[in-house]
Image (cartoon, grey):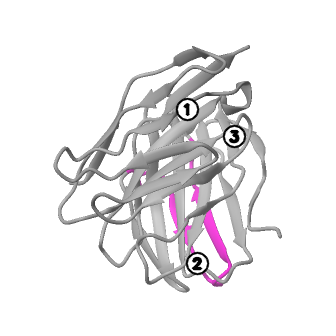
Amino acid sequence: GDSVTQMEGPVTLSEEAFLTINCTYTATGYPSLFWYVQYPGEGLQLLLKATKADDKGSNKGFEATYRKETTSFHLEKGSVQVSDSAVYFCALSDRSNTGKLIFGQGTTLQVKP
Amino acid sequence: NAGVTQTPKFRVLKTGQSMTLLCAQDMNHEYMYWYRQDPGMGLRLIHYSVGEGTTAKGEVPDGYNVSRLKKQNFLLGLESAAPSQTSVYFCASRRAGETHTEAFFGQGTRLTVV
């Protein structure tokens, strides 16, 4: 079945450091890909998405590119802030008529001043 | 805008007790989902619904039941709670028809079974 694998966390960075969180997927067909973020004590919210190969999703300084050849959707940010501390989830949506999202295990990011 | 609202936000149950978690959305979404979040395991799908009156099993349905009598509400029931059901539960909703649409999540219910 479809699956998503994320790099193990937690990730601890200093403010203004470069961030990469790796995400790879296994799916039949061509899924839509997402990054969701969960701030402490809150539910998940969409950070960015990409719907086809070579699409780049971007939001709040974060970027991720849909790479079909490597089945990857790595999240990057050039300069992280303390306020970016959260749990980040990579997810895919299959092409069935159920709209189900399949999530990776989540990566905790802690940014220190 | 309310979005997706879950009640209750916290609950402690004794083993064997029952309870119902309520999810309500005001966006007229067709699709609704219940997930559980456990450390190191991400979010796993318990049950889902693609429309009023329809439900289906997800990845980890055992020990749970659901109902979708009204389009805006999706109820998750635990008939006889077990310590293994200690988790954070999230409800989500999504518009039908497009696989790239955003899913909206509630703030979660933290359930502890002792």
Instruction: Name the spot of residue A99 as percent of width and height, x first.
Output: 42, 71
Give the side of residue B4 with respect to residue B87, left or right. Answer: right
Query: Secondary structure under badge 3?
Result: strand
Label number found at residue B68: 2
Residue segment shown in magenta: B60-81
Give the side of residue A91 with respect to residue A3, left or right. Answer: right
Q: Quadrant of the N terminus of chain B?
A: bottom right
In which quadrant of the rendered view does residue A74 lie? top left
Task: Please tell me which of labels 3 and 2 falls first in the chain.
Answer: 2
Chain where mark 1 sits: B
Q: Is residue A36 above or below residue A12?
A: below
Q: Amino acid at mark 2?
A: Arg
Task: Please tell me which of labels 1 and 3 falls first in the chain.
Answer: 1
Q: CA distance from mark 1 to mark 3?
A: 13 Å
Evaluate if marks 1 and 3 touch, with contact meaning CB atoms under 8 Å apart. Answer: no
Q: Residues within 10 Å of mark 1 (few under 14, many from 20)?
A: some
Q: Is residue A33 above or below residue B41?
A: below
Q: Amino acid at mark 1?
A: Pro
Evaluate if marks 3 and 2 touch, with contact meaning CB atoms under 8 Å apart. Answer: no
Label number found at residue B110: 3
Query: Secondary structure under badge 1?
Result: helix
Q: For the residues carrying marks 1 and 3, which lies nearer the camera in this image?
A: 3
Label number found at residue B83: 1
